[in-house]
Image (tube, grey):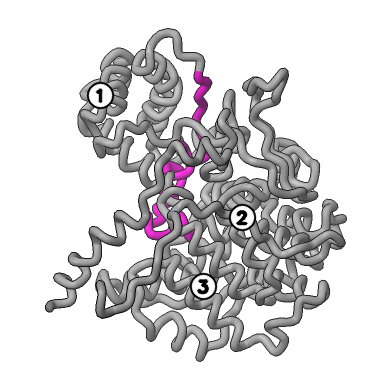
Amino acid sequence: MEQNGFITKLEGAVREACQIDNKLFEEYDVKRGLRNADGTGVLVGLTNIGDVVGYKKEDGKVIPIPGKLYYRGIDIEDITHGFQREDRHGFDETVFLLLTGYLPSKEELKEFSSYMAGLRSLPDDFVKDMILSMKGKDVLNILARSVLGLYILDEKPDDISLNNMIRQSLNIIAKFPTIVAYSYQALRHLYKGKTLSIRHPQKDLTTAENFLYLLKGESRGFTKLEADLLDLLLVLHAEHGGGNNSTFTMRVTSSSETDIYSAVTSAIGSLKGPLHGGANIRVLQMMENIKANVKDWKDEEEVKQYLLKILNKQANDFSGKIYGIGHAVYTISDPRAGILKEKARDLAVEKGHLEEFQLYELVERLAPEAFRIFKGETSTKVLCINVDFYSGFVYSCLEISRELYTPLFAVARVSGWCAHRIEELTFSAKRIIRPAFKNVYGRREYIPLESR
C-alpha cells in the first residue's frame, strides 16, 4: 500500500481514539487549557518577574479594570516613558532589570551594554554550517536549530549553577538578533533569489540599531525614529508573566533541569504556533482586506458594516474573528497597545501612512460596537485592542518582512524566558512541574494476535 493510503487508513482510528466527551471535563472538574470557568487563568505558580493585570475578582465575579504590566514591580509605562524622556533606547536596561530585579546605574548600564555588544558575533563556521548551509523556509525553525547548535559551542552546557545560567542567558540574548538577521538573509537568498548580505554586528550600536543594520546595511540605512520604534517593541515584548504559553513552556522544560538550549528551543516551538505568535500578521492581512473592500476609509458606517461582515464569517478569512481585538487577561485596555500607539502615529507621519493609521484608529473604536451588535445589545463583554493590533503596522512601516515579525517577538521575549528559567531553577521550593491527567478511555482485555 502506498504511504499516503496507509496513513489515510489509520486516520479514522486515530481520530476516534482521540475523542473525549466535553461533559467529562465538567464531571471531573478539569480546567481545559488551564482556564477557570470564568475565563481567567488557573493559578499554577509564583513569580517575582512580571505581572499582568487586567481584572479583579469581587464576590467571585471578574471585574474589568484598566490593564497594567509590571516588570519587577515597575509599571511598563514608567519604564518606557523614562528612557524616552532621556532620548535613549531601553532594551538593555530592561534585560538587566528582568534578570537582576533592579534598574542599573549609569555606569552599570554602560558596562552591561558593552558586555552584551561583545557577545553578538557568531563564529564563522557556525554561520556557514548551521545557518547558511542548512535549508529552511521559516526563520523560527532556523533559529531553533541554531540555538540547539549553540550547545556544541558551550564548554559547560549542562551546568545549572547560577553563575553559569547567567552567563548562558546573556550569551543567548545577545546572539538572538544576529541569528535571526542571518537566518532571514539566508532564506531570502536561497528562496527569493536576493543578494546574500552577511554583515558583522557593530558594538557601538544599540540592540535595535544593530538589528536594523544587519538587516538593511548602511546603504539603505534607517532613521532615528525607526530605531526608536523597534527598541520600544523589544521592550514591550520582553516579558508578560509566567502564564503565557511560551514562558510556561520554558518553565516546564527547565523544571526538569535540562540544558538552557533545549529549554529555549521548546519555548521557540511554542511561539511558532499560530495561536501564540503571528497574530500581528493576521491583523495586517485583515487590514489589507478592509482597505481593499471599504471604499471610504473615513465612513464610519461603511467600516462598521464591514466589521459585522467579518464577524458573520462573510469577509476576510471567514473565521469570524476581528484580529488584534481582545486578550486573555486584559479587558478594558492593554497598556502595551497604548504605549505603542503613541509612537506609531509619529512613524505613520514620517512614512506618509497617516491615512492608513487613521483607519486603524477607526477600526479600534468601532470594533467593540460591532461586536456588541453581533452578540446582541445586552452583551456585557469588554473588549480592547491588544499590542498585536498596531505592531504589524509598525513593522510594515519599518519595511521589515513578515517572515521576521514573530522571530522579532522571540528576540525580545528570550530575555523574559531566561529570567523565568533562572527563577524556576533557583528558588528554594523548586520542583519538577508534573500535573495530572485523568484517563477516561476505559479498560479493555488484550486479544491475542490470532483472534483479532
Residue 77 x %, y % = 70, 36
**Amino acid type at image mark 2:** Ala
Residue annotated with mark 2? 436
Q: Amino acid at mark 1?
A: Lys
Q: Nearer the viewer, mark 2 or mark 3?
A: 2
- Label 1 to label 2, Cα distance in Å? 42 Å
Kindly state the secondary structure of the residue where label 2 is placed: loop
Give x and y (percent) for residue 27: 53, 37
Task: Please name which of the two marks, 1 or 3, marks the residue nearer to the observer.
Answer: 1
Magenta span contains residue 367:
no
Residue 404 falls within the magenta-colored stretch = yes
Q: Residue at x 62, y 87 (%)?
A: 153
Q: Is 408 situated above or below 46?
A: below
**Residue range (magenta):** 381-407
Single out the mark in the foreground, 1 or 2: 2
Q: Residue at x 28, y 38 (%)?
A: 288
For marks 1 and 2 on the same chain, the one whose residue lies earlier in the sequence: 1
Q: Amino acid at mark 3?
A: Ile
Residue labelled with disc 3: 179
